[in-house]
Image (tube, rainbow, N blue to C red):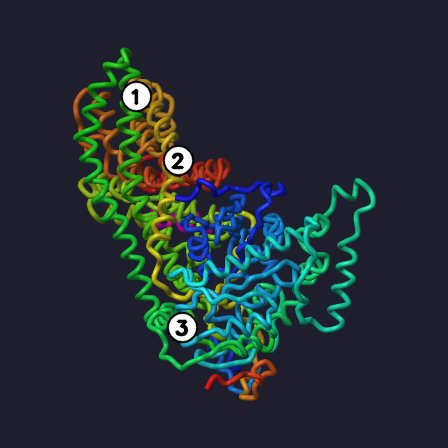
């Protein structure tokens, strides 16, 4: 029997692409795709392909997922989270961060 | 209070500035402290909550900075220009309706990467922009300072670091806005030539070409009169000069421009933020905990129970004091004066019902329960906790088509339905508000709970009382599921930014609660008075016996109850506590001797009576609240639905218990 039918939320391995609905709490991931119809709504919240999110908590019984998005926290219902494709986060900095000025 | 110069609402389409003052539009994302900023800027505290389902009113305030007057237009918090914060029309329509000369964008100094995209979108409109990097105090606590000069260069607009709570920088930002607004008015009037620099282009070549094409299309005058009548709002805005043609094009292509705005915003934020490592603030830590199952759920239960108890006990305590004071002073006075003024005894007695009963009901429901709950709700809203509760409860209420934030008003309904209905303003769509209000009217308030307990506990046992509450709960949840299936529309999936937890500003809390309370008094008092008068007249004129004869057979057949029980339930419309007192009074008149409830009805009959009077038509104050908040149609619909539910459940119970 494949593992996904045994548990409601199959564990994913760290190097796998997966929707936000399946990412365990505490993981940092890079958003690679946002599907319609949630796209416009998520764009307004700044959740676009390329952004980095950290899953901070999940509500029991398939409730919303809370992610950290920069300094903001965003709650997404499970159905919306399933529309957000994520890839493993790599330390390679995205273009926007390379020209950061170090305050020290 | 405000209202002397607050124009509520500015009629749409009307040229707002008849007095040639610059109009400053206040734009910002939700929870950026915009209303505190507004209060500082105008030196007034006003209630600016935007209740969905009502026409959005643009609060317009006259301000004066350094001797220069201007209009300040407050707009609802929005996440982008095409967002729909008020439910039906996109934000930019509201913005253009205000005909601003300058846009004052309020951003979070502690999270510019998130707030600059909206500022960029506003700048794209071709209107002058001033940026207020607000919440500087909270940003400092998180170790973030903003280099306003550098940001001003990048944005090509004045930038001020502000703090709404202390008022720092607010006047300076406003002064710049007034200056730019005056400049634009002079240019438009032809008294000055346009000045200033053009910001560096943000978007690539391909997008820029499309913007030009769109701008050209938008600036074409419609050919015929027929077409002129059908000009869509965006083109109308361009043609009357509320927004530049290119600005209009950036609105139309907004979704394609958004990714570039977010990328630039992130890069700029990195350049202008000066960061220090500081330990996470307690508020941030609690905010993070509050949505995790542990300790979030126990915390939520604690807050809910505290809210419930506060409404019951603080409300009950105040109600007792006010009721006693009323009985000691006003009641005896009215009892003497009214018969003296009004020679017809029946009318005098009816007037006594209206003035003594009706006003007392207002005072003993209104001030204690309604005001107490409003204060509590305002604290929960302004502290940011309500969004955490919304996340935790989203799944549970989602089954009934409601968002998680329904939890708090619904809980308050167990104290009193009236404030709970006003509390549904925290919901976004009218559908949600109707569904939630329906559930609220079915939730037994403290008065109805008292009826259930007093009718059942002494004569049928405590177990029966608990069973009755169980029946009411099952009927309520069933009705919620049914209403969700029947009312068209669906509950949108949750995408919610969690507000940071912060200490509420007391003056805001008070103003918010006070304006809502005022709304309650204004809508409920006339209905309460007239309702009491009519019922009082029916009672005093002895017409209730006629009513008993008419509805008696059906009450007997459907519910297996004596006729006067039906009349008592109908009269309980005035105040639910009356359901028992009136029944005993009627019995005394009809049978010529005072009887206990136990003599009048058997335990199964009492059970049916308790359940039906708990579920049936909301009381008159609730009805007034429904009407004021949701309109006549929804109020009547909800009343009929609850009456039908009550009769249906009652008839079923009567058959199961073998009394009908």
Tell me the element at label 2: helix
- Percent position (x, y) of residue B276? 42, 81
In the rendered structure, the residue with mark 2 lies on which chain?
B
State the separation of the CA atoms marked 3 and 2. 44 Å
Q: In this view, does B189 lie to the left or right of B224?
A: left
**A11, above or below A42, in the image:** below
Q: Nearer the viewer, residue B658 or B600?
A: B600
In the rendered structure, the residue with mark 1 lies on which chain?
B
How many residues crowd mark 3 within 10 Å: few (<14), some (14–19), many (20+)? some
- Say yes or no: labels 1 and 3 on the same chain: yes
Q: Mark 3 points at which residue?
A: B140
State the separation of the CA atoms marked 1 and 3. 62 Å
In the rendered structure, the residue with mark 3 lies on which chain?
B
Q: In which quarter of the image is the C terminus of chain B?
A: top left
Q: Name the residue under label 2.
A: B522
Q: In this view, does B43 lie to the left or right of B306?
A: right
- Percent position (x, y) of residue B105? 54, 61
Find out whether residue A99 is within the magenta segment: no
Residue drawn at x 67%, y 66% as measured from the top left: B197
Segment tinted magenta in the rendering:
B471-482
Residue drawn at x 36%, y 64% as measured from the top left: B502
Q: Which of marks 3 and 2 is nearer the N terminus?
A: 3
- Mark 3 or 2: in front is 3
Q: Which of marks 1 and 2 is nearer the N terminus?
A: 1
Q: Name the residue under label 1.
A: B351
**B323, above or below B215, in the image:** above
- Tell me, yes or no, whether the two marked residues, 1 and 2, touch with CB atoms within 8 Å: no
Residue drawn at x 50%, y 41% as measured from the top left: B8
């Amino acid at each position: 029997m494949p593992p996904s039918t045994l548990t409601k939320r199959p564990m994913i391995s760290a190097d796998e692409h997966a929707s936000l609905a399946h990412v365990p709490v505490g993981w940092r991931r890079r958003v690679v795709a946002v599907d319609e119809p949630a796209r416009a709504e998520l764009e307004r919240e700044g959740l676009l392909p390329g952004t980095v999110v950290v899953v901070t908590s999940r509500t029991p019984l398939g409730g919303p997922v809370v992610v950290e998005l920069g300094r903001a926290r965003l709650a997404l219902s499970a159905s919306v989270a399933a529309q957000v494709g994520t890839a493993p986060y790599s330390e390679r900095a995205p273009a926007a961060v390379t020209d950061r000025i170090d305050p020290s | 209070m405000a209202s002397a110069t607050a124009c509520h609402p500015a009629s749409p389409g009307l040229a707002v500035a008849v007095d040639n003052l610059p109009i400053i539009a206040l734009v910002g994302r939700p929870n950026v402290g915009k209303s505190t900023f507004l209060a500082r800027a105008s030196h007034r505290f006003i209630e600016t909550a935007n209740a969905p389902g009502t026409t959005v009113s643009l609060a317009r305030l006259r301000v004066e900075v350094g001797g220069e007057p201007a209009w300040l237009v407050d707009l609802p918090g929005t996440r982008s220009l095409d967002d729909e914060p008020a439910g039906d029309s996109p934000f930019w329509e509201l913005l253009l309706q205000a005909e601003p000369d300058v846009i004052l964008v309020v951003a979070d100094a502690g999270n510019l990467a998130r707030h600059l995209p909206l500022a960029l979108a506003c700048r794209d409109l071709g209107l002058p922009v001033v940026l207020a990097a607000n919440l500087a105090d909270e940003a400092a606590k998180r170790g973030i300072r903003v280099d306003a000069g550098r940001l001003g260069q990048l944005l090509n607009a004045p930038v001020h670091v502000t703090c709404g709570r202390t008022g720092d920088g607010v006047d300076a930002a406003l002064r710049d806005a007034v200056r730019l607004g005056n400049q634009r008015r002079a240019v438009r009037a032809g008294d000055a030539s346009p000045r200033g620099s053009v910001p560096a282009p943000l978007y690539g070549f391909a997008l820029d070409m499309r913007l030009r094409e769109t701008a050209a299309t938008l600036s074409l005058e419609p050919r015929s009169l027929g077409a002129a009548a059908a000009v869509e709002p965006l083109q109308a805005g361009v043609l009357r000069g509320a927004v530049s043609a290119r600005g209009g094009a950036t609105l139309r292509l907004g979704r394609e421009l958004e990714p570039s705005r977010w990328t630039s915003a992130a890069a700029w934020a990195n350049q202008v933020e000066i960061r220090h490592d500081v330990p996470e603030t307690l508020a941030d830590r609690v905010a993070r905990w509050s949505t995790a199952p542990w300790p979030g759920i126990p915390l939520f239960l604690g807050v809910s129970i505290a809210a419930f108890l506060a409404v019951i006990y603080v409300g009950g305590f105040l109600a007792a004091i006010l009721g006693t004071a009323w009985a000691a002073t006003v009641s005896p006075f009215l009892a003497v004066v009214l018969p003296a003024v009004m020679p017809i005894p029946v009318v005098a007695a009816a007037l006594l019902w209206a003035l003594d009963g009706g006003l007392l009901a207002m005072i003993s429901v209104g001030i204690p329960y309604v005001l107490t709950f409003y204060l509590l709700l305002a604290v929960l809203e302004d502290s940011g906790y309500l969004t955490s509760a919304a996340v935790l409860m989203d799944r549970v209420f989602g089954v009934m088509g409601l968002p998680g934030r329904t939890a708090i008003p619904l809980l308050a309904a167990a104290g009193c339905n009236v404030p709970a209905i006003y509390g549904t303003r925290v919901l976004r769509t009218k559908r949600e508000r109707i569904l939630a209000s329906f559930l609220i009217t079915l939730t037994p308030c403290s008065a109805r709970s008292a009826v259930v307990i007093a009718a059942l506990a002494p004569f049928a046992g405590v177990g029966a009382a608990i069973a009755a509450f169980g029946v009411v709960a099952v009927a309520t949840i069933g009705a919620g599921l049914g209403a969700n299936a029947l009312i068209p529309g669906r509950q949108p999936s949750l995408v919610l930014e969690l507000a940071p937890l912060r200490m509420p500003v007391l003056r805001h809390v008070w103003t918010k609660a006070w304006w809502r309370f005022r709304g309650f008094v204004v809508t409920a008092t006339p209905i309460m008075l007239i309702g009491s008068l009519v019922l009082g007249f029916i009672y005093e004129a002895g017409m209730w016996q006629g009513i008993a004869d008419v509805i008696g057979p059906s009450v007997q057949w459907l519910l297996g109850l004596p006729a006067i029980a039906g009349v008592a339930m109908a009269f309980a419309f005035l105040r639910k506590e009356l359901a028992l007192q009136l029944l005993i009074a009627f019995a005394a008149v009809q049978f010529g001797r005072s009887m206990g409830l136990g003599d009048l009805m058997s335990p199964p009959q009492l059970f049916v009576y308790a359940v039906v009077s708990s579920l049936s038509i909301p009381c008159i104050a609730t009805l007034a609240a429904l009407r004021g908040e949701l309109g006549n149609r929804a109020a009547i619909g909800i009343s009929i639905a609850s009456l039908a539910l009550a009769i249906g459940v009652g008839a079923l119970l009567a058959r199961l218990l073998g009394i009908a």
